[in-house]
Image (cartoon, rainbow, N blue to C red):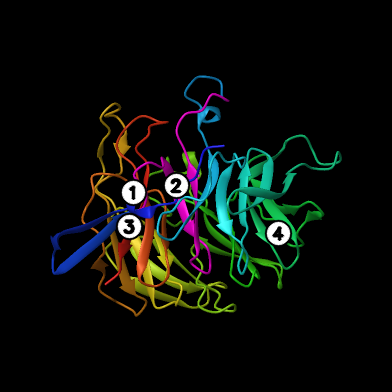
Amino acid sequence: MKSPITVAALACIFLTLPVLGNAQTHETLLSSTENAYNPIASPDGKYIAFVRTGRWSGGSGGFGRSNLRSEVAFMDANGNVLTGDSPARCFLQEWIPDSDDVVCYRGTRYYLVSPPGTIARQGETTFPPVIPAKMVQGERVAYLSKRDEFVWLHRISGVESELYTPQGPLEGSYVGLSLGDILVASHDERYIAACNDWAGLKVYDTVTKRWTDFGKIIVHPDRDWSWMQPGWNPWFTRKPDDDRLAFIQDGKLIVASADGKKKVVVLNNLKNAGLAVPSPDGTQVAFATFDPTPMKLRPDLQFYGGTTLWVTSISPNSTAKPVTQKSPETTFTLRWLGNAKLLFDRATDDIAFNASHRLWTADVP
């Protein structure tokens, strides 16, 4: 096993960038050596889980996703890497509230992984023999710690869906529309959000056994964003029963209650914006804007670079503040590291399996 990096000063670069508008930005490269994306901070801010990427030899040798390296690893908040060669060869979904475990998945397998990279538990999203063969399970999973249950989405013929667990379907979770791939539970685990940019956002209430349909939203304006399975979490976590969520819809940044009965339009007239995420204290929302241009190697496709990260208060008709300079690179994942820093990744305009993915933080003024 490779020796972990233990000296943050060798891997951490601090940048004071020029003034953007009236704001001075402060960005920190967490590691100059880790080729990684999808950083997610633990609830206590002690650790950062992330996914190492690039090409690996376990695939077909072509350009399909089987050739995409995905190893869940950990560093501390200063960029000291804790994990050598990781046995957790999977994608990263989310930290479990009040826990040191992260929920992971790949293909039909799901996992709980603990720092520095120990697989604490694993299973498979299989179905009993009585389930029709035409049923296809979703890849992403969520974990409900109070029930000690993994949950995933399965689809029947692409037009009908249901939330499923190893013990069977969740009562009332059947709907007549195909749902998205992202599954993430609210902090108190009462609600489960299911969403993507095609099917929109739907929220299942495990108490009333009902769905709330929020309609089409924008997780990320790049429709190919989910290929590498980055994560997104729209839920507020200020207190266990704060069941609100933030999202972008029709050029607006919206904060809404989980039942959809209360909605506040925080910002208007947003273009090419996505990745809305509330701060831990619930007072602000961060989001990203992009300035897409034709890709270098595939000019028929768009590269969503020109990325700027912003924060805004949750009051109606607020004004957003830039937290970073506009970067020519793109961002797949945006999170908070405490209430005073944003945690995110950046990648250059290049073909798949490149080595240009890096992890960053930025101070929130």
Give the residue drawn at x 74%, y 58%: 149
Which callout, 3 or 4, points at the residue further toward the start of the chain?
4
Work out whether mark 1 precedes mark 4 in sequence or the reverse, and give the earlier one: 1
The Cα–Cα distance between marks 2 and 1, rounded to whole angstroms, is 9 Å
Crowding near pointer 1: few (<14 within 10 Å), some, many (20+)? Answer: few
Horizontal side of 334 relative to 46 (left or right) equals left
Structural distance between the alpha carbons of marks 4 and 2: 45 Å
Is 132 included in the stretch rendered in magenta? no
Q: On residue 10, which mark appears?
A: 1
Q: Residue furthest top?
A: 61
Quarter residue 146 falls in? bottom right
Q: Indicate which disc residue 5 carries.
A: 2
Q: Which one is closest to the eye, mark 1 or mark 4?
A: 1
Callout 3 secondary element: strand
Residue bearing the label numbered 3: 288
Disc assigned to residue 173: 4
Q: Measured from the top left, where is residue 130 in percent x and y?
A: 86, 41
Whether residue 155 appears in this view of the structure is no
Residue occupying the point 23% across, 49% down: 327
Q: Give the residue displayed 82% in from the left and 54% down from the top.
A: 167
**Which residue occupies the foreground of this view, 222 or 329?**
329
Is residue 37 a member of the stretch shown in magenta? Answer: yes
- Which region of the structure is painted magenta? 30-58
Between the residue at mark 3 and the residue at mark 4, the CA separation in whole angstroms equals 32 Å
Res 335 → quadrant: bottom left
Please tell me whether mark 3 or mark 1 is closer to you in this view.
1
